[in-house]
Image (cartoon, rainbow, N blue to C red):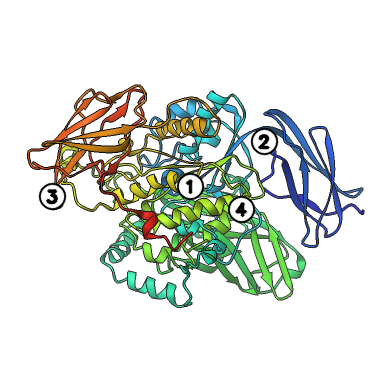
Amino acid sequence: MKLSEKFALYRVFTSHMVLQRERPIVISGTAEPRKAVEVAFAGRSRNAVAGPDGEWNAEFPAMEAGGPHVLTVSGAAGSAPVVLEDILIGEVWMCTGQSNMEMPVFSENPFFRTLNAEEELRHADYPRIRLYNSMLTRRLAPEGPLTDEAGFGWQVCNAETAADFSACGYFFGRQLLKDLDVPIGLIATAWGGTDIAAWISREKFEVVRWQPFYDSPDEQERIWNTLKTADNFKALLSWLERFDACGKAAPECLAPEFDDSGWKPCPGATAVLPRPGRYVCRLSFELPAEFAGRELELKLGIINDVDATFFNGEAVGSTGVETPAYWSAERKYTVPGRCVRAGRNCIAVVADDHYGAGLVNVQELEFTAPGLAFKVRPECRIDTVFSLPADFPARPDVPSVGANRCPGGPNYPSTLFNAMLNPWFRYAVRGTIWYQGCHNNGEFTYYPLHKMLIDDLREHWHDPEMPFLLVQLAAFQEHSPENRREDAEAEAVPFAEFSPYALTREIQAEMPRARKQVGMIVSFDRGDHSDIHPRDKQTLGFRLARKAEHMVYGRETVCDGPEFAGFRQEGRQLRVFFRNVGSGLATSDGKAPAGFVLGDRSGFLAPAEAAIDGDTVVLSSDGIPEPQRVRYAFTSYCRVNLMNKEGFPAVPFRSDKLDYSGMFADLP
């Protein structure tokens, strides 16, 4: 068999990676069709032949935890081998979901980083934890699954790499390292504000005969035009006028001959915009002679939020708030032939970040012309035009929900499955931790969709009982972190018969009963009435790790809090029974249990007085002389304190919950 002259590894395989222990190790890449490569790893060698599609696979036997090891891929004589170093064998977990999984250990936004972030980073050197941060290079793919990653590769955990990584994932992995004493690999693929349908494959939707896809090409524009009539869109336009008045980019910095050697370099051609403001990102590269004078189609990727783009000093396109879901739209601009020269060229992107941290996510420049195609990774440098002052008013809310569900937005069904998950199914993992639900808040269909997600991941990883751990939504009332409510005001909100957040938590609590090897941790007690992003991700990471250690690694440890097991009426009182009481019931503050509500047959609800009695809680209320039902933390937000003596909080519940399996009996 002839050896290939051209070959590569898929980008999920890089130096510093962790490979899953106790599983067959499969390494894959591309080569010339029907030609071979030689793959050497840990003292063994394999010949792998590329199929007609140019993909090859080399399988090695399962290994125990350890390392470091070296992987070498070689081809025909004269071709340079690919060598990966510092490879460990250990435990690998996927960390995915929406913004609460995306929240980094540290960011410039004080409301979007973990507690004690600076102190955490001072102690973040863990050479046996390896991180792959796909969130920095996130992509959309509504048209179909992508075959490979676009990220920077595996990185050793330290203060720099941990800062941008999922805080929830990092603290989970840190606890696993401490307790299991094996290398830990963590992959972060979260995207804030996303719908669960975006993470499910189109194949799965078709199997269950679900039709969430927009069929009309005019749907995106129709939704956006409707949203643009909203008052908050008008407020956004007024805010943008003030933003724009803060400063302009100097015209000379857009020209190709401008000296940008003093600007900050951006490894991997991805520029992170650390805080709201205006930036100029210069992308320099070489073009082959055959492109000179040709009109080109330029693909830039996603720029968050808006941009104006210049090719060799001439404006070639811009994307602003008039574009549906502009903050996640992929940029595609036409470059006139008069701008295109052989050799050195420069693209200047004036990028405005309106909220939090932004991104110029280029990775590779892609040019196409009739009969020609070319990709190149440019040299990237960035400079700040202005950062918004601390007292500048926050950006008004953007009318985003409907627009996000259009093909150009991150909530279009399957687009994130295609772009963020599909490249990883070739890489063995132990399981998934999942923190999502806010975007589907109050939707009954979240029950079948959540089951579909779990099944979908397991089918694509060919692991029918792959562990799946989810974080139940935290207590939350109204997102206003810069204008917080007083605690007493938030706690005075009356209990409602129906609470969208309570419904979502109830559905999440059903998942361990609906599917095997699914675990859930409670975060209600760590919630914040004025911030949808609770900052105590340390506690959530610890709880996830304890759940994994019990469920996956067979450790005899308490990992769950008290769970409703029934009640008994005793005159004017109700006695509530619990599972998972551990060594006994307790409260976190030593006070009487809070967060209980009693109800009667008419539907009336009233707060209850509660007292711990052994492994039960006894409830009464002057307003409910004949209690017939009980609820605990079944609301958007309330103060809670019930736990077991091991410190794990009680699971929110209502005794009169719905039968979800009966509601969706016609779905798998």
Label 4 packing within 10 angstroms: few (<14), some (14-19), many (20+): some
Q: In terms of depth relative to the viewer, which is nearer, 436 or 503? A: 503
Q: Are marks 1 and 3 in contact (CB under 8 Å)?
A: no
Q: Secondary structure at mark 1?
A: loop
Closer to the observer: label 1 or label 4? 1
Q: Secondary structure at mark 3?
A: loop
Residue kind at label 4, given as amino acid type: His
Q: Are marks 2 and 4 in contact (CB under 8 Å)?
A: no
Q: Determine which residue is flagged by label 1.
A: 515
Q: Determine which residue is flagged by label 3.
A: 604
| Residue 525: % across, % down | 31, 35
Q: In terms of depth relative to the viewer, which is nearer, 240 or 91? A: 91
The residue under the point 77% across, 62% down is: 53
Residue kind at label 2, given as amino acid type: His
Q: Determine which residue is flagged by label 4.
A: 460
Quarter of the view holding residue 46: top right
Q: Determine which residue is flagged by label 2.
A: 16
| Residue 294: % across, % down | 69, 74
Q: In terms of depth relative to the viewer, which is nearer, 265 or 619? A: 619
The residue under the point 48% across, 40% down is: 166
Closer to the observer: label 1 or label 2? 1
Q: Are marks 1 and 2 in contact (CB under 8 Å)?
A: no
Looking at marks 1 and 2 on the same chain, the residue that comes earlier in the sequence is marked by 2
| Residue 582: % across, % down | 37, 25
Looking at marks 2 and 4 on the same chain, the residue that comes earlier in the sequence is marked by 2
Give the CA separation, mark 2 to mark 4: 25 Å
Residue kind at label 1, given as amino acid type: Arg
Residue kind at label 3, given as amino acid type: Phe
Q: Secondary structure at mark 2?
A: loop
Looking at marks 1 and 3 on the same chain, the residue that comes earlier in the sequence is marked by 1
Give the CA separation, mark 1 to mark 4: 16 Å
Asked whether residue 249 appears in the rendered view, the answer is no
